[in-house]
Image (cartoon, helix red, strand yellow):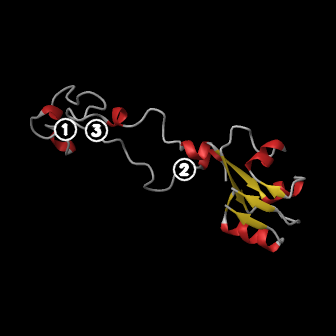
Amino acid sequence: MKLNTIKPAKGAKTARFRVARGIGSGMGKTAGRGHKGQRARKGGRGKVGFEGGQMPIQRRLPKRGFNSAIARATAEINLSDLNKMKATEIDLVALKAENVIRHDMLSVKLVKSGKLERAVTLKGIGATKGAREAVAAAGGTISE
């Protein structure tokens, strides 16, 4: 194969449709714009985002976006993070004290990632189903 012999597959490239070029083109006369009406005329499309007087979507939606405020204030910790901690009774305050989570976090969720090798007691901490099983298997407990 040589670079000068490479061609696209047969039928992959089609010719540009030439509208308003006479009756023989099949797109002559009205050039696909139909008959009369605003959109048949030159410049007849209206304002971008205009919805006929209805409040436009860019004004209906909140400007701060769709980021959950709850998700931003919730930290995610792994099972392996609990191994590094000295405390056996772990709650939000203990996690902040040992710098496992940031100090501005309001809630915590434990996820099954890594391995838990000691028994711990979790208080006021959410956990996934797999994380609950891993804590129980290590001899620990979770109380919410």
Q: Residue at x 39, y 48 (%)?
A: 14
| Disc 2 target residue | 7
Q: Residue at x 90, y 53 (%)?
A: 86
Q: Earlier in the sequence, mark 3 or mark 2?
A: 2
Q: Residue at x 82, y 54 (%)?
A: 81
| Image coords of residue 11 (percent x, y) | 42, 55
What secondary structure is marked by label 3? Answer: loop
What secondary structure is marked by label 1? Answer: loop
Q: Which mark is residue 18?
A: 3
Q: Which residue is drawn at 18% across and 34% down?
A: 39
User: What distance separates the C-alpha of mark 3 from that of mark 2?
Assistant: 24 Å
Crowd band around label 2 with a 10 angstrom C-alpha radius: few (<14), some (14–19), many (20+) = few
Crowd band around label 1 with a 10 angstrom C-alpha radius: few (<14), some (14–19), many (20+) = some
Question: What amino acid type should be assigned to the residue bearing mark 3?
Answer: Arg
Question: What amino acid type should be assigned to the residue bearing mark 1?
Answer: Ala
- Name the residue at the left extreme: 36
| Image coords of residue 19 (percent x, y) | 24, 38
Q: Residue 43 carries which label?
A: none
| Image coords of residue 52 (percent x, y) | 20, 34
